Image (tube, rainbow, N blue to C red):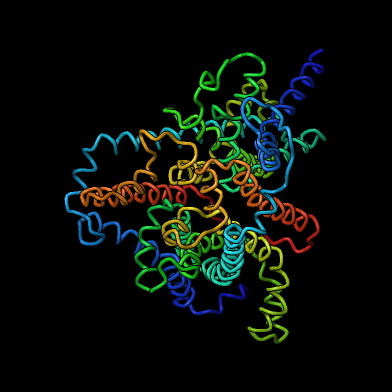
Amino acid sequence: MSRGRTRVGRGIMLAALILFATAPLLLLLVTSLARGWFHPQVVPAAVDVRAWGELFTDAARRGALVNSLVLGVATACIATLLALPLGRAAALGTKGVRRIVALLAFGAVAMPPVALGIGLQLTVLTMGLGGSLRGVLFAHLVPAVGYLTLVFLGVFTQWDSHLEEAAATLGATGRERWTLVLLPLLRRPIADALALGFLVSWAQVALTLLVGGGAVRTLPLDVLAMLQSGQDQRAAAGALALTIPALVVLGAARVAARNTTAVVA
Amino acid sequence: MNFMSTRPAIVSRALPLLMAGALLGVPIVVGVGYLVAGTLGIVGNAAPGGLQRALTDGAVLRSAALSLWVASAGTVIALLGALVVALCFGDEARDSRVARRIAALPLPVPTVAAAVAILLLLSQGGWLSRVAMRLQMIATPSEFPALVNDPLAIGVIVAVVWKELPFLLLVALSLQSLRGVALSDAARTLGATRLQTLRIITLPLLVRGMVPSIIAVFVFVLGSLELAMVLAPSSPLALPLLIQERRQALDMASHGEAYVIALLATVLALLAAVAHEWLRDDP
């Protein structure tokens, strides 16, 4: 009797959890495909994919999508290149060094984006990059490098350096140790870092708004603009377009985690 | 032999600090420095005296209270939800694996997308309102309770819980798997009931391990602009929106207040960063 009750309780909890996690996403999907879905209709009367098509055919929306992609890819690559050596150098340092670097990295992540953006705006304007894609990229790099430094600090704190030592003993140069030992072993953490760096930039609103000064339109800003002008269908399509790469990245990271044999972190 | 110990000690200390200083410290120092200069009226066309005005301005205090309320309530509810799910579905049963996978779905959803989804669900013209009308629970959309842009910021809190519960759940599950069941088993062997084991052993250990993540969620919510833009009330404004409003005001005195509020929010975030680092385990 008690076991039966437990099973029913778990079933109810599981159903509630499924509803909680999926309902908002399903609603986004239905809204993005619904034509003229007015209150009090519970189910849309007609389906159309116009809002999805516009993401690629409308010049302004396509421009926003392209800007987001360019910023995401550039942020991911540059932040990974900067954070990997920083995380490694910090992990090999003393506990005090690790703490200071982790503190700075978390500080860059934790600073309210609006406050960080005000300071970065000055820097970007001084560099002559105000309202440009390069200026926004510079701004996105600050939290991205913070996040990725924390990732690589974690990776290298638990790093087993025996293989590097063996390679060095066998005469490998510093460069050979990087290319033949470290980078192949770091494939998964680097892939994770690229994904995370992309997502930090991909979802960024406040820094783009402040440093871009309205001249750089990205997909999240486009979604907000659509929402504020009452275009729910377009806003929902944009919001899902923002979500799909993020879900793909999460899925890919899980598959990589299952398939990888060189788990370091 | 540690391979890297061949590097001179001064280099292994100075190199990471120099790199961290250049890549992370400079933007933070410039950001904070600009806010301090703005507070003092040196830059940004701000009239001096912003600090005193901001600290005595009722609107600023109400905004701070709203932001702190949203961050606290959202974090606590997400934490409770994560603990319940972790304790109920932390085992290796098939439905537990399904539950964990489903619960993780909102994790990678960008905040702005989460805000749009919650708006479409909870607003007076949203889907729940339509269902309530179909069920004849309400006659007009305005009879549906205001759950979005409402004074208690319920919409923001729901969005925070939806978005952050999976993150805290992930942390709770990994802590559970690291901790194992040895302590709980020992307590049960010594005669503790299941409830006592949960209250005295399991929950305190889990929550203690989760403190850095709880701080991270709290700070993130406190500074989130997009949640406030879409779901928060227009009076009082959430702190990030108030900073924006004061900065864009025509009145120069308001500019100074914007820098003060941004500086206070930054100090709070940096204190949280110190607490986070203090409480984080570093082997």
Q: Nearer the viewer, residue A60 or B170?
A: A60
Do we see residue B205 in this rendering?
Answer: no
In the displayed structure, A94 sits above or below B163; it is below
In the displayed structure, B91 sits above or below A151; it is above
For the N terminus of chain B, which image quadrant?
Answer: bottom right
Q: Nearer the viewer, residue B20 or A95?
A: B20
For the C terminus of chain B, which image quadrant?
Answer: bottom right
Residue at coordinates 61% horizontally, 27% vertically from top-left? A39
x, y percent for residue A197: 59, 61
Task: Tell me where residue A177 sits by quadrant.
Answer: bottom right
Residue at coordinates 34% horizontally, 38% vertically from top-left? B64
Q: How many marks?
A: 0
In the displayed structure, B116 sits above or below A212; it is above
In the displayed structure, A16 sits above or below B137; it is below
x, y percent for residue B32: 33, 58
Q: Nearer the viewer, residue B117 or B280?
A: B117
Residue at coordinates 49% horizontally, 62% vertically from top-left? A216
Residue at coordinates 48% horizontally, 64% vertically from top-left? A136
Task: Tell me where residue B65 sits by quadrant.
Answer: top left
Question: Horizontal placement of B164 versus A98: left or right?
Answer: right
x, y percent for residue A33: 71, 42
x, y percent for residue B260: 27, 49
